[in-house]
Amino acid sequence: MSWKELPILLCSSQDMNEDSVLMLSCCRGGIMDVAYTIFLACHQICYVLGPRQGLTTADMQICFGIFLYNKEMHGVDPVVECYKN
């Protein structure tokens, strides 16, 4: 599946909310290119989040969990939250 096909599939499912956050842990060096491709293919996805370095699965679960907790429970803006983590 291409990076363009993934967001099209997600958006066509009609399970996405507006202002959605897509969390990826797969392509450190190309996250900006991937993010732009995703934004163009699905306007419901407003943020693409991923690590800048290699992390273990446990590290990713912790980081994404903290991100979601702060966003949902404390209303922290996703951009601000990414700088904090």
Image (cartoon, rainbow, N blue to C red):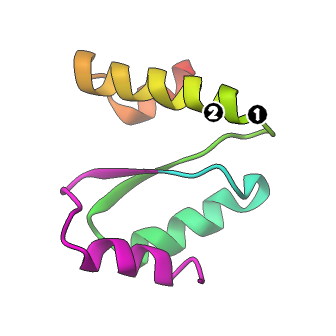
- Residue corresponding to mark 2: 60
Q: Amino acid at mark 1?
A: Thr
Dividing the image into 4 quarters, which one contains the N terminus? bottom right
- Check residue 7 for magenta coloring: yes
The residue under the point 38% across, 29% down is: 68
Residue 12 to residue 21: above or below: below
Residue 83 to residue 34: above or below: above
Instruction: Tell me if 9 is positioned left or right of 64 in this view.
Output: left
For the residue carrying disc 1, how many other residues have a C-alpha within 10 Å: few (<14), some (14-19), or many (20+)? few
Label 2 and label 1: CA atoms lie apart by 6 Å
- Check residue 10 for magenta coloring: yes
- Residue corresponding to mark 1: 56
The residue nearer to you, when weighing 76 against 66, is 66
The residue under the point 52% across, 68% down is: 36
Indicate the position of residue 41 as horizontal and vertical percent values: 39, 79
Dividing the image into 4 quarters, which one contains the C terminus? top right
**Quarter of the figure with residue 16:** bottom left
Indicate the position of residue 9 as horizontal and vertical percent values: 37, 79
* Region rendered in magenta: 1-22
Q: Amino acid at mark 2?
A: Met
Residue 11 to residue 76: above or below: below
Instruction: Tell me if 2 is positioned left or right of 69 in this view.
Output: right
Residue 2 to residue 68: above or below: below
**Quarter of the figure with residue 77:** top left
The residue under the point 25% across, 26% down is: 72
Label 1: element kind = loop
Label 2: element kind = helix
